Amino acid sequence: MLFLYRPRQSYMPFAAPRNMMRQDEYRWKMQGSFDATRRAAPPAPAAGPRDAVAKLKDAAALHEAGVLTDEEFAAAKAKVLAEDAQ
């Protein structure tokens, strides 16, 4: 049993503090550094009013350029506002 001949705590590349107060601080620090590596990325924000405003601006730009008629612009605006209300 070769593992019995290893010196105590030889697997750690650094020495742990000896008194209990410092040991608790050390454990909290190690746990914090471990938790920092395990955090998931924050979720992307849900599409909200900004998205609806951007869509309305795009439709208005198309309307001003003459790509959309008045009726098509009104239909697009109503559709965006209906999606935003849900």
Image (tube, rainbow, N blue to C red):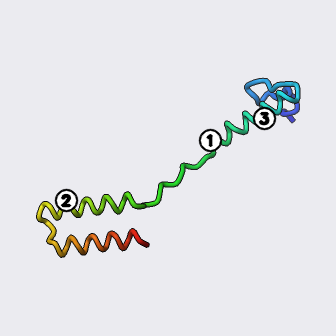
Q: Callout 3: helix, strand or loop? A: helix
Which residue is under mark 2? 61
Which residue is under mark 3? 27
Which residue is depicted at the point 37% across and 57% down?
A: 50
Which residue is depicted at the point 27% across and 70% down?
A: 77
Against 49, is 20 above or below? above
Quadrant of the rendering where the C terminus is positioned: bottom left
N-term mark: 1 or 2: 1
Q: Callout 2: helix, strand or loop? A: helix
Q: Amino acid at mark 3?
A: Arg
Quadrant of the rendering where the N terminus is positioned: top right
Q: Is residue 75 left or right of residue 68?
A: right
Against 13, is 73 above or below? below
Mark 3, Cα crowd under 10 Å, few <14 / some 14-19 / many 20+, is few
The quadrant where residue 56 appears = bottom left
Q: Are circles 1 and 3 on residues that touch, CB within 8 Å?
A: no
Which residue is depicted at the point 62% across and 41% down?
A: 37
Mark 1 and mark 3: Cα distance apart in space = 16 Å
N-term mark: 3 or 2: 3
Which residue is under mark 1? 37
